[in-house]
Amino acid sequence: MITTENLCVSYNGRTVLRDATIEAKPGSILGLVGPSGCGKSSFLAALNRLTEIIPGASVSGRIQFDGQDIDTAFPSSVELRRHIGMIFQKPNPFAMSIRRNLELPLREHGIHDRQHLGQICESVLRDVGLWDEVSTRLDQSALNLSGGQQQRLCIARAIAIKPQVLLMDEPCSSLDPMSAERVEQLIDSMRGQYTILIVTHNLAQARRLSDQITIFWTEDGVGRIIEQGDTETVFNETSNAIVDSYLTGRKG
């Protein structure tokens, strides 16, 4: 569904990620792991062009979505982000009602019929397990929700416009353990419906969730990929000494 070839990311001339080549299979969950500062978040940002709004950022290499270069397939960043959604580390609901959080991106993409909007809102809230919790207070501020509820609302907002790919940058790291477990269960339930790329520092979570895993590392201050493959194969059979030390907690 999404592939990269020799993807490089730089900020103000300083390269932070070099030659990242990956393949995320349709409907699978691809875990992206590695120590801080090795380019994982920059990699995600490049995939849906968030780098375009970062001063001094530049991207080279090739990114393909469903077999097409993204620059050709999606001249507009807005259209690209309809197909490739993003979930951030810290929940970021808009400072408006729960209902308007969901309706805003739908209206941006041309859906204005009130009944249709209501149907979509209910559907995605049910998908993320929030409907029973918020159905009687849709017009209250989303900022009144708990952290875990806010993150599930952000996921609902992302899937409302029916993307094929979801990029998740440490979506559980700012949540309490119980909320993190609910979000992790939600991500697991989405397997097969979306192609998901998830950055996580939680190796146990990466092992539980991901079908394939990609290990990022830093050499001479520049991030790169040092191993990738089926998750259980990498965890159990890696021949890379650095990867083995990292996955067993002796390094990184």
Image (cartoon, grey):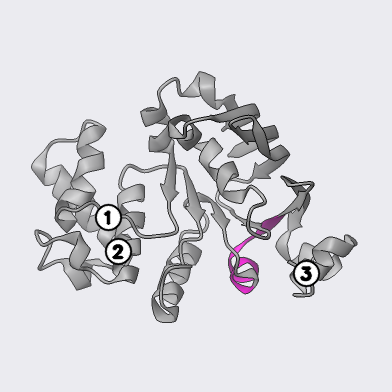
Q: Is 62 placed above or below 114 here?
A: above
Looking at marks 2 and 1 on the same chain, the residue that comes earlier in the sequence is marked by: 1
Please say whether residue 172 is one of the residues in the magenta stretch.
no
Q: What residue did someone put label 1 on?
A: 93
Front position among marks 3 and 2: 3
Please say whether residue 207 is one of the residues in the magenta stretch.
yes
Going by the image, does 189 lie left or right of 155? right
Q: Is 244 placed above or below 115 here?
A: below
In the rendered structure, find residue 150 and report the number of the disc placed on it.
2
Looking at marks 3 and 1 on the same chain, the residue that comes earlier in the sequence is marked by: 1
Query: Where does residue 189 sit, x and y in percent of width and height?
Result: 46, 65
Whether residues under marks 3 and 1 lie with C-beta atoms below 8 angstroms apart, the answer is: no
Q: Nearer the viewer, residue 119 or 86?
A: 86
Query: Where does residue 176 sit, x and y in percent of width and height?
Result: 41, 77
Tally the numbered discs. Answer: 3
Q: Give the alpha-carbon distance from disc 2 to disc 1, as whole Å.
A: 6 Å
Q: Is 50 placed above or below 188 here?
A: above
Q: Secondary structure at mark 2?
A: helix
User: Which amino acid type is shown beneath numbered disc 3?
Assistant: Lys
Front position among marks 3 and 1: 3
In which quadrant is the C terminus drawn?
bottom right
Query: Where does residue 148 sit, x and y in percent of width and height?
Result: 34, 70
Whether residues under marks 2 and 1 lie with C-beta atoms below 8 angstroms apart, the answer is: yes
In the rendered structure, find residue 191 and report the number of the disc placed on it.
none
The structure residue drawn at horizontal position 60% and vertical position 65%, both measured from the top left corner, is 201
Q: What residue did someone put label 3 on?
A: 251
- Work out whether residue 57 can be spotted: yes
Going by the image, does 59 lie left or right of 129? right
Looking at marks 3 and 2 on the same chain, the residue that comes earlier in the sequence is marked by: 2
Highlighted magenta segment, given as a residue range: 204-215
Going by the image, does 112 lie left or right of 211? left
